[in-house]
Image (spheres, rainbow, N blue to C red):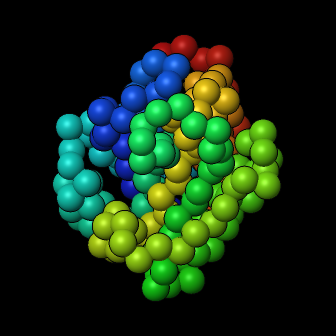
Amino acid sequence: MPSVYLSPSTQEFNRFINGGNEEYYMNRIVDAMIPYLRASGIEFARNSPGDSVEKSIERSNEFPYDLHLALHSRGTEAGAPTTDRGVNVYHFFFSPVNGEKAAYIIAQNLKTIYPRPDLVSVIPNLNMVELRYTNAPAVLAELGYDDNIQDALWLESNIPAIGRNLALSTAEFLNVPFVEPDLNITS
């Protein structure tokens, strides 16, 4: 069965300009992905908010996942409000073709919901440990600037759509039919 390791940020110290933090929002996006992954028959595991990056990598490497998906926001160096905007989707520079392929699928799909599709980029990277040391093809998506009010409000207002979009991208990458769950069912 196809599988993905979900690694939402554990960086609660990265504050959003409109309140909340990176860990909170990235975990909410993963929560929004889960019904779609289940409906599409994709197995998944996820990190815990208390995990370090190293622990997330270790847990991801315990099983032969087909994709490792890390979710983050982005901030400027100064941490002050910025006019910078955009979504960056990273893959390891020397990764097998699959890491790059996953990054392009995710970026293309995010362009359909991000308000400035021209600012969605795929970037090869040599230094991000979560890309470099995971066994599975790995992608790290920075879903906008947490210190830009437009990006922060877009992310906060579109958690269900972002979760659906990332689940769709995961299904597309894993070559499985994407199935819409019945989100009105209560358990």
Residue at 70% x, 55% y: name it: 120
The image quarter in which residue 102 lies: bottom right
Residue at 62% x, 44% y: name it: 84
Residue 73 placement (x, y as % from top left): 49, 43
The image quarter in which residue 63 lies: bottom left
Residue 104 placement (x, y as % from top left): 67, 67
Residue 143 placement (x, y as % from top left): 57, 45
Residue, far top? 186
Q: Is residue 25 above or below residue 178?
A: above
**Viewer-side residue, 114 vs 14:** 14
Query: Is 11 situated left or right of 40 in this image?
Result: left
The reply to whether residue 102 is visible in this rendering is no
Residue at 54% x, 14% y: name it: 186
**Viewer-side residue, 156 vs 176:** 156
Q: Is residue 99 above or below residue 184?
A: below
Residue at 78% x, 39% y: name it: 115
**Viewer-side residue, 84 vs 127:** 84
